Amino acid sequence: MADVKIIKATGEVATFDISKLIGSLKRSGASDETAVKIATEIETSLYEGMRTKEIYKKAFARLKKHSRPTAARYKLKKAIMELGTSGFPFERYVAALLDFQGFKTEVGVIVDGQCVSHEIDVIAHKEDLHYICECKFHNRQDRTCNVKIPLYINSRFKDVEQSLKNFKGHQNKFHQGWIFTNTRFTADAMQYGKCVGLKLVGWNYPKNKGIKDLTDRAGIHPVTCLTTLTSREKKALLDLEIVHVKNLCNYPHVLDKIGMSKTRQKKILSEATELCEIE
């Protein structure tokens, strides 16, 4: 098939690469045979200027027919964007990823800086490591974190760091500021982060250590990825602070609280349990 130009979410034009689509399907848990079959079907329906969003929808619909849990894993980026506009569920999600790495975390903590008080999204500590984490949530793929974000966050971190050094037991700890986002950082933002020692974690940055990679390793997927849930049900679970699928598997009784029938509960928990087992 002749090269077909497609449009990414950022507006960038690229040549469709079937191997990338096959790879993303396989990483979600699809078998080699299923991934090739779906990608080949989609390739035949391509047209010049087709948006990656439409390609994703076609792949997701086909994948869901094969396996709902696999389809749930495939929609990770979209599912994170469905965590809501407040950003609070995303903070809890980031905390869960850090918990998996052995950190003890606190969400939404007021900390006195040397000059002023700050509300910190996530504080994570393990042994002599003490991280001050800020979470920048976006519900659109074309949104990015520009250099203004790390400039602002670093100034807050420095104020908190100066205050922490006066606390007993903190003098020998390694303090570091972190920024997590579910989209991307601009080149200037990444350069500034490296220069001042501020850690940046985006969707696929740093390489092999981005949100996507951390999620794959932890096996912690947002509850919004479940294909059996309606938008209303997702919102109700998030309001009850059920942010990821393992939360739901551990506390299935919360489905009673949102007025769900036993038949619906059985269907949803079946997908959730299977996804947890895959993870």
Image: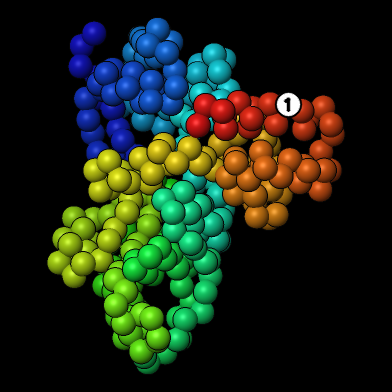
* Residue 122, percent from left and from top: 46, 65
Vertical relation: 150 (above or below) 82 = below
Return the x and y of residue 249 as percentages of the image width and height.
66, 38
On-image quarter of the N terminus: top left
Q: Is residue 152 left or right of residue 229?
A: left
Along the viewing direction, whichever of 4 and 212 lies nearer the viewer? 212
Query: Vertical placement of 258 versus 57: above or below?
Result: below
Q: Nearer the viewer, residue 50 or 215?
A: 215
Label 1 neighbour load within 10 Å: few <14, some 14-19, many 20+: few
Can you see residue 159? no
Q: Is residue 52 above or below residue 1?
A: below
Quarter of the image holding residue 207? top left
Residue 128 visible: yes
Q: Amino acid at mark 1?
A: Lys
Q: Residue at x 55, y 49 (%)?
A: 83
Q: How many marks?
A: 1
Q: Residue 227: x, y in percent?
A: 61, 30
Identify which residue is drawn at 40% across, 7% down.
33
Residue ID at (49%, 47%): 81
Q: Quadrant of residue 166?
A: bottom left
| Label 1 sits on residue | 267
Figure quadrant of residue 213:
top left
| Secondary structure of residue under mark 1 | helix
Residue 134: give x, y in percent of width and height.
Answer: 40, 66
- Which residue is at the far bottom? 115
Colour pattern? rainbow
Question: Is 263 left or right of 68, judged from the image as shown?
Answer: right
- Give the residue drawn at x 56%, y 36%: 225
Q: Taking 184 as reference, is 139 left or right?
A: right
Q: Is residue 43 above or below residue 87?
A: above
